Image (cartoon, grey):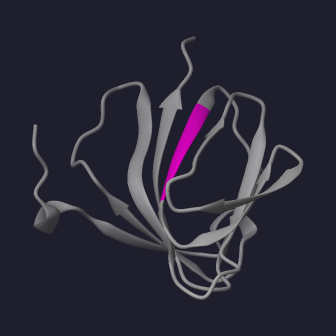
Amino acid sequence: MVTAKNEQVLTLREHMRGGAGTAQLTALLSQLPENARLFSTIRLAPGASIGYHVHEKETELFYFVQGSGQVDDNGQTVRVSAGDAMATFNGQGHSVVNDGQEDLVLVAAIIKDPA
């Protein structure tokens, strides 16, 4: 199944997970498999963030495409930039802050853990 770029849906989330500013999420597929909750790009303008949150019964994967920033990776602050990847497993938490001068863009996928 192919989802053309003009079919991908853009959603704006103000203060995502308690973060600052607006996160722009573009759903990359029109339909997800049953065990997936999200497959999107996320764009954060300078100063925008996704607040700290914990994942329960799911894993979130990030691939950073553009820009730089910092993440709280389950209690550890880590600098990230284009080309870096991150996994947040069941019971772990994370946040993302764009403290750079350009948009921070990442691809995010959330996969539900087996029951």
Q: Report how many numbered discs are placed on residues in the image.
A: 0
Q: Which residue reaches farthest top?
A: 115
Residue 103 x %, y %: 51, 80
Q: Pick the quarter of the image with the N terminus.
A: top left
User: Horizontally, is 50 left or right of 91 in the view?
Assistant: left
Q: Quadrant of residue 54?
A: top right
Task: Determine the residue positioned at 21% across, 49% down.
Answer: 30
User: Horizontally, is 78 left or right of 8 in the view?
Assistant: right
- Relative to 46, say whether 40 is above or below: above
Q: Which residue reaches farthest right?
A: 75
Task: Determine the residue positioned at 83% across, 43% down.
Answer: 74
User: Horizontally, is 59 left or right of 19 in the view?
Assistant: left
Task: Determine the residue positioned at 51% across, 62% down.
Answer: 82
Residue 28 x %, y %: 28, 53
In this rendered view, identify the residue nearer to me: 74 or 34.
74
61 within the magenta span = yes
11 within the magenta span = no
Q: Pick the quarter of the image with the C terminus.
A: top right
Give the overall secondary structure of the magenta segment.
strand
Task: Determine the residue positioned at 77% across, 44% down.
Answer: 93
Residue 47 x %, y %: 68, 85
Residue 75 x %, y %: 89, 47
Residue span colored magenta: 59-64
- Relative to 29, say whether 24 is above or below: below
Q: Quadrant of residue 11?
A: bottom left
- Relative to 106, say whether 86 is above or below: above
